[in-house]
């Protein structure tokens, strides 16, 4: 890849457009806009993008990075024009992007504590569900008779929204954290269990017949042959469970938690602090994307043999 191809891209032009908008157009909003913070953030992001571009070898990976960064520049430009520059949106409900970035910097320690709480609860419930659901799904999926019955039972229980169990969890469990873990467990268990069973039931029969010819033991059959062959479906169920888990956790935190990003958003929205509300919403989105990206990388690593 040539240096021209690496650095002369539309994304960098979009950065210049964002920069010129902030420098040339005056602020018309009555609220504080923190334009300098926005410029500093955009410049830091551009420097980081250029630095990372030096080490990316595959053009498709570089294009993906630049597309994402370019999208961020477009959003910040339009957001800034609609708020700080032309005051199209209500500046009480929709603060300028520079103000949101400044608020994030101001509340970074509080936000970090809430992120750790939310991610910790999610991972705890998710891992507990995976540890229970995957072996159980392997066993029931391997048994044709039990697997057929379990399929309908799974459809019944997975159709019940896990959030309805929160009142029972509050009545039975000692802390809200344990209630949250319980709800995340239920939200994750059924998709992972169903995905595992589906993977087992769809394993190529020729693979199983070949293993039987070699007199493979049942434990080795389940964990050395069936499990690897079912990983794609298992990860599909895990992805579904992980996505639902964050939605449910945020909803649960808005009901009765004392920490977590859902609590952060609900607490400040009750006081009409929409700068912190939008900051919390953006942080939740970034955290979900980061966790999903890490999980997808793990999936690609474990399924690399399929290539």
Image (tube, rainbow, N blue to C red):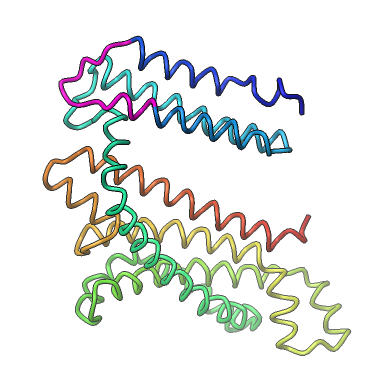
Q: Does residue 246 appear to the left or right of 135 in the view shown?
A: left
Residue shown at 46% from the left, 32% from the top? 44
Residue 153, position in %: x, y?
A: 46, 75
The mark total stands at 0
Picture quarter containing residue 186? bottom left
Residues in magenta? 25-39
Residue 138, position in %: x, y?
A: 62, 79
Picture quarter containing residue 166? bottom left
Q: Does residue 149 appear to the left or right of 38 in the view shown?
A: right
The chief SS type of the magenta part is loop
Residue 137, position in %: x, y?
A: 57, 77
Picture quarter containing residue 26? top left
Residue 165, position in %: x, y?
A: 28, 71
Residue shown at 27% from the left, 62% from the top? 252
Can you say whether 257 is above or below 110 in the image?
below
For residue 33: magenta?
Answer: yes
**Quarter of the figure that contains the N terminus:** top right
Residue shown at 64% from the left, 83% from the top? 143
Residue shown at 21% from the left, 75% from the top? 170
Can you say whether 254 is above or below 198 in the image?
above
**Quarter of the figure that contains the C terminus:** bottom right
Task: From the viewer's side, name the closer residue of 186 and 286.
Answer: 286
For residue 229: magenta?
Answer: no
Residue placed furthest toward the top: 24
């Amino acid at each position: 890849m040539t240096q021209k191809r690496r650095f002369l891209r539309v994304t960098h032009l979009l950065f210049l457009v964002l920069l010129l908008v902030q420098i040339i157009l005056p602020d018309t909003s009555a609220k504080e806009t923190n334009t300098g913070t926005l410029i500093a953030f955009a410049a830091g992001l551009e420097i980081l993008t250029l630095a990372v571009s030096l080490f990316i070898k595959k053009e498709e990976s570089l294009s993906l990075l630049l597309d994402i960064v370019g999208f961020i520049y477009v959003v910040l430009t339009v957001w800034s024009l609609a708020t700080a520059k032309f005051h199209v949106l209500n500046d009480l409900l929709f603060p300028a992007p520079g103000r949101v970035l400044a608020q994030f910097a101001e509340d970074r320690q509080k936000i970090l504590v809430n992120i750790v709480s939310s991610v910790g609860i999610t991972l705890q419930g998710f891992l507990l569900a995976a540890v229970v659901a995957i072996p159980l799904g392997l066993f029931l999926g391997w048994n044709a008779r039990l697997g057929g019955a379990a399929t309908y039972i799974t459809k019944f229980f997975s159709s019940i929204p896990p959030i309805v169990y929160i009142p029972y969890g509050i009545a039975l469990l000692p802390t809200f954290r344990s209630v949250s873990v319980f709800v995340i467990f239920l939200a994750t268990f059924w998709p992972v269990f169903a995905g595992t069973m589906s993977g087992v039931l769809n394993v190529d029969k020729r693979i199983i017949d070949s293993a039987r010819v070699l007199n493979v033991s049942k434990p080795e059959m389940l964990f050395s042959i069936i499990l690897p062959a079912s990983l794609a479906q298992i990860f599909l169920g895990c992805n579904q469970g992980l996505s639902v888990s964050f939605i449910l956790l945020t909803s649960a935190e808005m009901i009765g938690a004392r920490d977590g990003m859902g609590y952060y958003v609900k607490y400040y929205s009750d006081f009409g602090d929409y700068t912190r509300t939008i900051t919390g919403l953006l942080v939740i989105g970034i955290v979900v994307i980061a966790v999903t990206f890490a999980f997808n990388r793990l999936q690609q690593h474990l399924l690399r043999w399929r290539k």
